[in-house]
Image: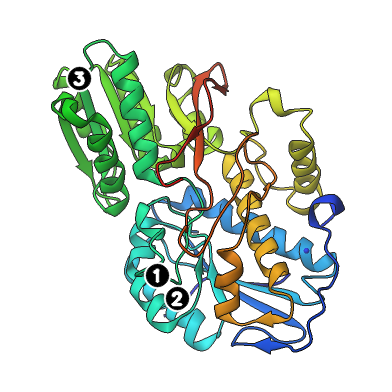
Amino acid sequence: MKTNRRTFVTGVSAAAVFSGSKVAFAQKKYDDGATDKEIKIGNTNPYSGPASAYGVIGKTIEAYWKSVNEAGGINGRMVNFITLDDGYSPPKTVEVVRQLVEQEKVLCVFQTLGTPTNTAIHKYMNQKKVPQLFVATGASKWGNPKEFPWTMGFQPDYHTEAVIYAKHMLANVKDAKIAVLMQNDDYGKDYYEGLRDGLGKDVGRIVKQVSYETTDPTVDSQIIQLKDSGANTFFNIAIPKFAAQAIRKAADIGWKPAHYLNNVSSSVASTIKPAGFENSQGILTAQYLMDPTDKQWDDNADMKMWRAWMAKSNPLANLTDASNVYAHAVSFLMHETLKKCGDNLTRENVMKQAANHQKLRVPLLLPGITVSTSPTDFYPVQAVQLSRFKGETWDLFGDVLHAESS
């Protein structure tokens, strides 16, 4: 079967962010995917299918590595980034990841996107002892180094995010009656269990929970069911396509609950604008990255750097799409990890360095949020701040809230 292969022998104009001299080591050590001249990284992304709104992440990561190479690479080596379309389909993910590991012989895979898709390759990657790094999913299971020492997440975990929403609902919604829309897979279930755990003895406040399949054309019927339950609070656990449909349908039928939207669908470009700004007022989410539509960051050094980089290296991308901020931030973390490896580019050392960041300041993370990892802590980002949609942008409020795992 043909795959949509996109190969970039692809470092950065913002020298302050991407500087780094060659690290000297007495002996060079390599596994598959690394040589004196190259570091080969594999990736899967849904360039097609129901989650194709996330395809911009893969394209921005491509642009990042291309600019890294233009600046001299990583310790003198060019990055060969191979990204394949899996259509957000777990069987397809298995197929293309096997291709990356067994045929392309990549050093590691990076930012493979989706909870069900990463679940499908989780055991395989660990059996093969190939790093599955900074996966693009917040499921809590990616932080389990004891059983899965070759897999690490990046973003705050879904369970913790949902616990934060639950506590906010109980504190701020009078007589909360909660309705839940969730994707019928591990991603949806992780958020839902977090909500239930966060509610604790008040779990009975959940009056209706309905799910959808990624093959469904719409979630219109589900939103009607949720409104008919009498709920005054709505937890929207959906990827951008369905999250936008849910926001729009709720407005169409005159349902105006306190609305909590999972972070993975908080992009103004891919969710809020398609749903309609007028339909999205007051929606709440949790954030850990600077939102490019939030004017408070206009004079921030990180945002200025990112916009200059986008103009030069990714000029066709949408500057209002938070996925482009996300892609740059997680690529910076991967870049720093590989730089720390020096000339010891074994898979074991890549994982060792990934698990050895201490309060690393990653550009575009919200102030007060840093990356820390250890051999027993595979949750790089462990804090969020609540935000409310107002006008045409997100408005942060409250304190930075730290995850349970920290």
Query: What is the x, y in percent for residue 272?
Result: 48, 30
Q: Disc 1 on helix, strand or loop?
A: helix
Name the residue that disc number 1 marks: 93
Name the residue that disc number 3 marks: 177
Q: Amino acid at mark 2?
A: Val
CA gap, disc 1 to disc 2?
6 Å
Taking depth in this image into account, of 137 and 222 the one nearest to the observer is: 137
- Disc 2: CA contacts within 10 A as few (<14), some (14-19) or many (>=20): many
Task: Determine if residue 252 is in view.
Answer: no
Task: Determine if residue 53 is in view.
Answer: yes
**Residue 166 found in image quarter:** top left
Taking depth in this image into account, of 115 and 21 the one nearest to the observer is: 21
- Asked if the residue at tag 3 contacts the one at tag 2, i.e. Cβ–Cβ closer than 8 Å, the answer is no
Q: Disc 2 on helix, strand or loop?
A: helix
- Asked if the residue at tag 2 contacts the one at tag 1, i.e. Cβ–Cβ closer than 8 Å, the answer is yes
Up-down relation of residue 311 to residue 107 (above or below): above
